[in-house]
């Protein structure tokens, strides 16, 4: 049995160039691995045309390291002619008629889309247990969740099913599952990556990003995802850059801030200790790490609940049973078509969030809740900017605990938000953040370090992350 | 445990255009109360300035040229519609004489 997918992307590319293997070999291996690990439930839909696509690829492009490499796509990113469900009953038969901007980029690089990964319904959740298709499992312990909402992508990478995946991050949904499963996940700066074709959850927070086995491959994949897109007017025009360019450099003189809140008693002791261990190594290696006070961090979950639920209630108004997706039977008029379709089509978590979101935006409530949240959001962002006047990066643990057991947060509307308490502030400020594995706890469960950078300074995050990854090796 | 009233649940369900079963109404009375209490915590934040941040993007006034671009065919536009008749999407009767 072949094991090409355990090699680095660079090594796989060399084998392809030397014609020792073909893209079809890689696809066959990935499909076999997915079949063998079916119990992980990492995928919702497998691309049944991927073998043909591999055969049709033609001559290897030597200058394109991604040629013929299998990739998995989170199921809230639309793929032309390939079912995209958002893990919801309301879209369980939806076949997109266009590709998301990132999917176009992936296809331009002749990568092979193996399938669509499992997730929380409409990305609402922190364990992927709100999926209509059942939760994906954590390969480190199948009784535990793989996090959420990009839990399927995290399972797929961590379980070695594919080397590369895309996730989306509205309030930690790339970084938290990456931490729980021991992989590398980056939420780029808001505006870095086009959101065109990402089924919107909270438009002012959502961002697509890469989930990979290593820091280097993460930076490589980000290289091809970024860029201004006229179909997403919140995407930002920037000079083309190579995000791998600082990888391998030492960290002498680097100034790093550690907010007190990130090592407060909300964090599990083993995780705090692991982070302190990493910090002492960073200091020995020439970095300066200062514990700093940062205000408003403890308001972030509250802001997230208000802003994300409000924006979600507006974004999900489009699911009306008319143009696409599920429509309830036995409806007498347009009103009952809307309400029955949505009542039968959405799961509990989504219903709760849309209902509370609609309440937040109704009448005077919009001032009381939404406007106030936007004011505090501005303050949190100013706090980050204040720290970044003196520091290159901010670090802390990605999560307060290791991956929880299945079922532990299910149907608890409050706990579902608390898993993301350390990662949400980054979405508020639109900053880039990455989770890199730094080891395991006494039970062998992965712990992730969260590295936050200045806006559009992903390269410095990768510099520190690769240094830590190298030490760990 | 504190709960919303049945009427309060039905009010937010109406705002959200979601029909609920009797069991759901009962279940959401407690669950929505938890979330309503959560969002209320914003009122406790005292020290803040009044500048609002709608989006992390500073320059959000950019618009693209208003020119005709690619268009969908009727077939493409209706391909996912749950009920259709030829190239039309079917909906329940909207105007009754």
Image: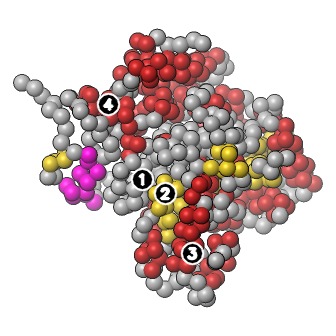
CA–CA distance in space, label 4 to label 2: 28 Å
Q: Secondary structure at mark 4?
A: helix
- Residue matched to label 3: A26
Q: CA distance from mark 1 to mark 3?
A: 23 Å
Query: Looking at the image, is mark 2 or mark 1 earlier in the sequence?
Result: 1
Task: Say which quadrant the N terminus of chain A sits in.
Answer: bottom right
Looking at the image, which is closer to me, B11 or A192? B11
When the figure is inspected, residue A12 is found, relative to residue A226, above or below; the finding is below
* Circles 2, 3 touching at the beta carbon (< 8 Å): no
In the image, residue A219 lies at what x, y percent?
Answer: 65, 63
Q: Residues within 10 Å of mark 1 (few under 14, many from 20)?
A: many
- Left or right: B16, with A12 as reference point: left
Q: Is residue A300 above or below residue A192?
A: above
How far apart, in angstroms, are the residues tagged by discs 4 and 1? 22 Å
2 or 3: tag closer to the N-terminus: 3
* Rendering quarter of residue A347: top left
**Range covered by the magenta-colored residues:** B70-82
According to the picture, the residue beneath numbered tag 2 turns out to be A116
Instruction: Report which residue position mark 4 lands on.
Output: A340
Residue B77 highlighted magenta (yes or no): yes
Q: Pick whichever of labels 3 and 4 is earlier in the sequence.
A: 3
Same chain shared by disc 1 and disc 3: yes
Disc 1 marks which residue?
Answer: A84
Q: Residue at x 80, y 51 (%)?
A: A444
Residue at far left of view:
B97
Taking the magenta stretch, the answer to whether it contains residue A434 is no
Name the residue located 87 percent from the left edge and 53 percent from the top edge. A282
Q: Earlier in the sequence, mark 1 or mark 3?
A: 3
Task: Give how far apart the Cα atoms at labels 3 and 4 are.
Answer: 45 Å
Image marks 2 and 1: residues in contact by CB distance under 8 Å: yes
Task: Identify which residue, A212 or A256, lies in the foreground.
Answer: A212
Q: Position of residue A131 (x, y in %)?
A: 51, 43
């Amino acid at each position: 049995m072949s094991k090409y997918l355990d090699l680095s992307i660079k090594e796989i590319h060399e084998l392809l160039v030397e014609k020792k293997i073909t893209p079809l070999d890689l696809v066959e291996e990935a499909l076999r691995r997915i079949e063998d690990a079916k119990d992980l439930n990492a995928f919702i839909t497998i691309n049944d045309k991927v073998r043909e696509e591999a055969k049709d690829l033609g001559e290897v492009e030597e200058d394109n390291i991604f040629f013929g490499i299998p990739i998995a796509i989170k199921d809230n990113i639309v793929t032309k002619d390939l079912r995209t469900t958002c893990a919801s009953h309301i879209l369980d038969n939806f076949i997109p008629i266009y590709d998301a901007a990132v999917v176009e980029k992936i296809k331009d690089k002749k990568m092979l889309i193996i399938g669509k990964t499992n997730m929380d319904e409409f990305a609402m959740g922190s364990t992927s247990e709100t999926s209509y298709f059942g939760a994906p499992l954590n390969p480190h312990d199948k009784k535990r969740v793989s996090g959420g909402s990009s839990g399927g992508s995290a399972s797929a990478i961590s379980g070695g099913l594919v080397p590369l995946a895309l996730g989306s991050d509205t309030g930690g949904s790339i970084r938290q599952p990456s931490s729980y499963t021991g992989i590398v996940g980056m939420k780029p700066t808001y505006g870095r990556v086009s959101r065109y074709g990402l089924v919107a959850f909270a438009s002012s927070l959502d961002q697509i990003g890469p989930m990979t086995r290593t820091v280097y491959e993460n930076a490589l994949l980000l290289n091809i995802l970024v860029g201004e897109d006229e179909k997403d007017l919140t995407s930002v025009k920037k000079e083309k850059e190579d995000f791998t360019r600082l990888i391998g450099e030492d960290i002498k003189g680097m100034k790093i801030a550690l907010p007190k809140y990130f090592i407060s008693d909300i964090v599990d002791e083993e995780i705090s200790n692991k982070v302190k261990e990493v910090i002492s190594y960073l200091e020995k290696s020439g970095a300066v790490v200062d514990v700093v006070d940062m205000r408003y961090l403890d308001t972030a979950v509250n802001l997230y609940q208000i802003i994300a639920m409000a924006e979600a209630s507006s974004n999900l108004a489009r699911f009306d049973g008319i143009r696409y997706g599920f429509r309830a039977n036995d409806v007498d008029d347009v009103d009952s078509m809307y309400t029955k379709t949505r009542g039968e089509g959405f799961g509990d978590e989504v219903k709760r969030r849309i209902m509370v979101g609609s309440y937040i935006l109704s009448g005077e409530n919009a001032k009381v809740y939404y406007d106030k949240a936007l004011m505090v959001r501005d303050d949190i962002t100013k706090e980050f900017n204040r720290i970044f006047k003196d520091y290159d990066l901010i670090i802390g643990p990605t999560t307060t605990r290791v991956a929880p057991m299945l079922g532990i947060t299910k149907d608890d509307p409050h706990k579902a938000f608390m898993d993301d308490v350390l990662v949400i502030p980054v979405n508020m400020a639109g900053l880039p953040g990455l989770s890199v594995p730094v080891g395991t706890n006494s039970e062998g469960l992965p712990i992730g370090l969260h590295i936050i950078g200045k806006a559009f300074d992903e390269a410095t995050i990768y510099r520190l992350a690769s240094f830590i990854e190298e030490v760990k090796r | 445990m504190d709960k919303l009233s049945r009427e309060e649940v039905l009010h937010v369900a109406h705002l959200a255009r979601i029909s609920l079963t009797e069991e759901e109404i009962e279940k959401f009375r407690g669950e929505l109360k938890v979330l309503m209490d959560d969002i209320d915590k914003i009122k406790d934040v005292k020290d803040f300035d009044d500048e609002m941040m709608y989006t992390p993007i500073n320059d959000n006034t950019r618009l693209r040229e208003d020119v005709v671009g690619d268009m969908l065919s009727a077939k493409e536009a209706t391909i996912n519609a749950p009920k259709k008749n030829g190239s039309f999407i079917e909906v329940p009767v909207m105007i009754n004489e």
